[in-house]
Image (spheres, coloured by chain):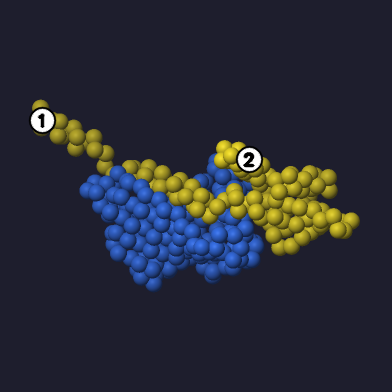
Amino acid sequence: MTDTKSVRIERTFDAPIDLIWAMWTEPEHFANWYGPMGATIPKADMDVRVGGARHIAMEMETPGGSMQMYFVGEYVEVDPTTRLVYTEHMADADGNVMTAEQVGMPEGAPTETSVIVELESLGDRTAMTLTHVGVPADSPGAQGWTMAIDKLDARLASLRS
Amino acid sequence: MTTLNTTLEESRLDETFAALANSTRRAILARLASGEATVNELAAPFDLTLPAISKHIKVLERAGLVSRSRRAQSRPCTIDATPLADVAGWTDQYRHIWDDRFDRMDDYVRTLQPTDTDTANDKEATHD
């Protein structure tokens, strides 16, 4: 349970590679699809160059009222239009990286992950491979905890929308 | 054997999800994540009666998310995160979120592109 885990997803879109690249790199496009079920993206600051910062705000309606979550990170690799790599951490509204305890999660819950996007042009279509790499947590139990709460809040939000 | 295990696993997941599908119970778990607490302590932030809080705690106990010590009369509650780890293995969680996002990306890129209808009609016109 302590090894790094990753999610890999392959999809093909009916759109040229430039447009799919823009989905990831232009805030107005990004905000249209990125939020999970029932969430909106009120803020997406993206300085898309190596070492550039990203700062994303996500807003979800939950039974307890609206909940904001913030994510910050850095672009690690930017090869238009074929490869994008960035890191992601949970953060506060000002973009300060938060520890697990600060966001109300048990000590040791992961707050950093890496996202790798690879695009391949198929003419009018684009093949995309997404790899989301999780940094291992000290406590696997705590790790599931963070995600379960997120998932449920999102699920509930989507059921009520 | 596998089927039985799968079935047991599924029903346990159902129970965990049901227990978590309530904001009071999630708040109780969030409180317990920072250390054990008695029923009285857990009830304090809520505008609920003690029996109502006890009922929520029983649901969490049945789902294996909370256990209660017998060593003191106050029987403090502690959190057990194991079922949560099962509910949301990191990869399953994110796979679901990304799949959902990409469905939306798919819909969205379609709205941005000129429909093929016009060009298709033109082509048909030239064939005629």
The x and y percentages for residue A147 are 57, 54
Tag 2: amino acid: Leu
Tag 1: amino acid: His
Residue situated furthest bottom in the rendering: A51
Q: Does B110 sit above or below residue B34? A: above
- Chain shown blue: that is A
Label 2 residue SS: helix
The x and y percentages for residue B10 are 60, 40
| Residue at (26, 42) in percent of width and height | B114
Q: Nearer the viewer, residue A21 or B11?
A: B11
Chain B appears in which tint?
yellow
Between discs 2 and 1, the one toward the N terminus: 2
| Residue at (45, 50) in percent of width and height | B98
Which residue corresponds to mark 2?
Answer: B8
Q: Nearer the viewer, residue A139 or A101?
A: A139
Label 1 residue SS: helix
